[in-house]
Image: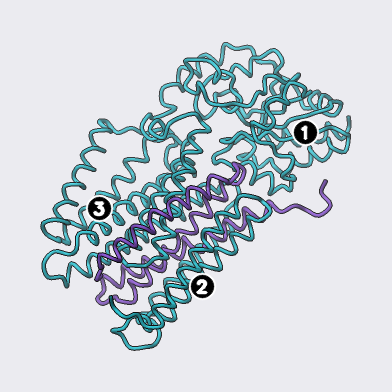
Amino acid sequence: MDELNIWQIATFFVWLVGSVTFILALKFLASPKTARTGNLLGAGGMAVVIAWTFLTYDLASPESEPGMLSNWWIILVGGVIGAVAGTLGARRVPMTAMPQMVAIFNGAGGGAAAVVAIAEFLEFADHGEGLLPLPFVIASLLGAVIGGVALTGSVVAFGKLQGIVTARPYMLPGQQLITGALFLTMLLIGVYVAGFENSIPLFLVFCAIALVAGVVLTMPIGGADMPVVVSLLNSYTGIAVAASGFVLSNYALLIAGTLVGASGAILTQLMTKAMNRSLFNVLFAGFGTAGGAAAAGEEGEEQLRETNAEDVAVLMAYGKRVIIVPGYGMAVAQAQGPVRELMDLLVAKGVDVQFAIHPVAGRMPGHMNVLLAEANVPYDRLKEMDEINDDFADTDVALVIGANDVVNPSAREEGSPISGMPILNVDAAQNIVVLKRGRGTGFAGIPNPLFSNEKTAMLFGDAKPSIEALVQGVKQA
Amino acid sequence: MELTAFELLSALFILVLAAFVGYEVVSKVPTMLHTPLMSGANAVHGVIVVGAMLVAATSEGPVRIALALIGVILGTINVVGGFVVTDRMLEMFKKRPGER
């Protein structure tokens, strides 16, 4: 075994410290109290690893002269550009657009992992005599393909969430065949490059196909399922980073990448479970294509009872308990501020106000929690589905704000696309008030019998003015 | 790139153990923190910027220098943006003093 110099040994310890802070960052997210500290700890560990690499790289590599890392200007220039872009993006983005932002940062990470894998392969395929070691080539290929898919997949996910690309599932003719052909080609090229000839042009073709595959895989998935996709792509980037860590023999990359790969995978699984669907169904079923048109026709025939803000305000102000069910409609309308004002007024009148948060309400799990927390709603008023579902029966008013599929009772019956999805038992409440932008169906395009329930009154309009009208109403009640 | 069999096997051990740690840690995170979790995990894989730096350090010739630069830019966006946006989300979860 080669002798390690003191700097190399120290580098291992820095990686160890970094890895521990990354694990703690995720672990501390188990409670809102420690979550922020954990994140800062992770950022601190990351800063130490980056600074250490920058300052000591040449000391730790025996063949080069001691001093600062060569080509340091590339890192400074790139670092400044990246830091400015990242900070601006992260600071400026409105809370509702959070899922897109995570998607774009994830795409950047995937791209970086792919670039690292490509650069390393180019370097050694150039100088190498004979075939490169198999583990090295396999890891490079994996880093390139997974990173490439994560990059373009995230860009499509961003486009779908932002409304630039159609949110509807977009199936190519012969979708399965094309996907299959792409992956078979990559497999063949991969085997050839690894086993027979370390060809640079073929490696680059392989990377190009990976980029196309990311688009082809993501386009058929509906906008409502994008959070699951973002989580999955997040996991992919983690795996690509781990592969790069393997290529570079860098344990910090290896551990952090694997950690994220595994945690992203389990998070994806938790999310699909909350929707009672399999990952396979999310990725390949083109969910939301079939139901839409048929559903829109049926809705028109239903008798919906319309109400006005004054009536609802009185109903709530003189009730004992009100449960608010926020959904994506609250997020798009940016109504969380007025919602909080409404809560404060009702609480002041002695009404018990709770929020029922469905695991997939909004566009990301926890999306509603983030928005309501932004509006300073104390988080102990936010109840998870299992915790609050039994309370609906003795609730005077269930106020549904722009939520649809998560309160759709047809999930309890057979034959609906959302059959079996756990839902909030809103229909058990004494009175149900649904705030809705228009008469259309929800994101999944499924008719909702809750709206025609005899206990339900509809308050049509954008959520923000509707809630503001309720606030006025409660003040006068 | 002089991977010895020992290094290879150590890396495999680290891989498997880290995967278990990731699985265990995330299983305990409540639903309401899943968005910050996704974002936080996203920031952690921003460590790829270190890989891009190592590529930069050994870069000669315009192609590799260009690749290194792109890698460093993308990696830095990931790591800086990731941590900042996660912090912004988590900042909102703090309890105000005097709240019930």
Let me know if marks 2 and 3 both belong to one chain: yes
Chain coloured purple in the rendered structure: B
Residue at (27%, 58%) from the top-left corner? A139
Question: Quadrant location of the N terminus of chain A?
Answer: bottom left
Nearest to the observer: residue A375 or residue B21: B21
Instruction: State the mark number for residue A208.
Output: 3
Residue A76 at least partly seen: no
Give the colour of chain A.
cyan
Nearest to the observer: residue B72 or residue B66: B72
Residue at (56%, 41%) from the top-left corner? A365
Residue A35, position as x, y percentages in the image: 63, 55
Q: Is residue A422 left or right of residue A193?
A: right
Residue A319 at least partly seen: yes
Residue at (84%, 52%) from the top-left corner? B98
**Where does label 2 land, which residue?**
A48
Q: Which label lies toward us, 3 or 1?
A: 3
> Element at badge 1?
helix
Residue type for callout 2: Val
Asked which quadrant contains residue A395, the reply is: top right
Residue A290, position as x, y percentages in the image: 41, 22
Instruction: State the mark number for residue A72.
Output: none
Q: Height in image: B60 above or below A369?
A: below
Asked which quadrant contains residue A195, the reply is: bottom left
Residue at (20%, 57%) from the top-left corner? A203
Residue type for callout 3: Ala
**Where does label 1 land, which residue?**
A469
How many neighbours does mark 2 have within 10 angstroms: few (below 14), some (14-19), or many (20 or more)? some
Let me know if marks 2 and 1 both belong to one chain: yes
